Amino acid sequence: MTIPISSGTTTTTTTTTIASAISTTDTSVRQPNVLLNKRKGVAIIRLNRPHKYNALTKQMYDSVITSLTDAATDQSIKLALITGTGSYYSAGNDLNIYEKSFKHFDGHMNHTVDNLIEKFRQFVIAFIDFPKPLIAAVNGPAIGVAATTLALVDCAVASDTAYFLTPFSSMGLSAEGCSSYTFPQIMGQSMAGQMLYFNHKMSATEALQSGLVSRVIPSAQFDEYIESWIFADRTGIVNTCYPQSMRASKQLVRSAAIRRVLHEVNRSECLILRDRFNSDECLEAIEKFFGRNKQK
């Protein structure tokens, strides 16, 4: 049975395997851009816009927030997993949301930017405050906020086809998703600098070496690995890990004090992002982006 829980999100209690949840959708049939599938105590959140490389729209932000909130409050859910449909995990923000918001607010730049920044801030908060184990199955490239929020999940595993890119300076923007705090903590100052300042395209192997992901799996085996790791009868997480035990350990790792730091970092980053969105550099970068797209 399929039950809509928010605009653009669908939840289902079928026994769909991870493999079919990750596989490319038949785009001839319109489906929600975010799907929430509940299976054996696992909430599988799937970014489902493969024809746009799972680039995030405002509706998708809302849907992911709603899905995480639903998984957090559903007593039957032990943990959550987020992944993508098709060849990409997510290409990050769909820049068309900037143009659409601008039109929605009748050309008022401040209203446009404030609305986008607040939506973005709430999206990051949903990752910071999720109380249960949260896994990212990075089936392909992760760009922008899709890469930065990986540092807020509890465990990320990646396909060998994945890469990680935070092209903030090429867009005239600045670090977001708490990456100004989490990236140096995870990978050290030098590599974080390459990522956050210099648009370094990090390979899956580099992500493993830096600690951003815990494992890299050959793409041909990725679906099978995730399925077995989580659901195998005798060895899968859902059958070997008690949910309250996992949650208690997460409360120690992601303590209230650490969450307060992350919330403050998120707030500070969003304030700077607001200024960057209004900067000449950002406006020039967005104009170049739309100009290139119109020429295609």
Image: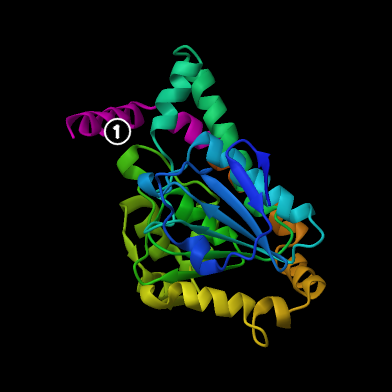
Report helix, strand or loop for mark 1: helix
**Does the image show residue 270?**
no
Location of mark 1 (residue): 285
Task: Give the overall secondary structure of the magenta segment.
Answer: helix
Whether 39 is among the magenta residues is no
Asked if residue 259 lies left or right of residue 21, the reply is right
**Quadrant location of residue 259?**
bottom right
Give how far across and how far down residue 71 sits, in percent: 72, 55
Give how far across and how far down residue 96 sits, in percent: 39, 31
Give how far across and how far down residue 78 sits, in percent: 74, 66
186 lies above or below 124: below
Quarter placement of the C terminus = top left
Query: Measuring 58% from the left and 79% from the top, which residue is drawn there?
Result: 229
Which kind of residue does numbered mark 1 sit on?
A: Ala
- For the record, the magenta segment spans 271-296
Give how far across and how far down residue 223 sits, in percent: 47, 72
Asked if residue 286 lies left or right of residue 47, the reply is left
**Does the image show residue 290?**
yes
Asked if residue 270 lies left or right of residue 127, the reply is left
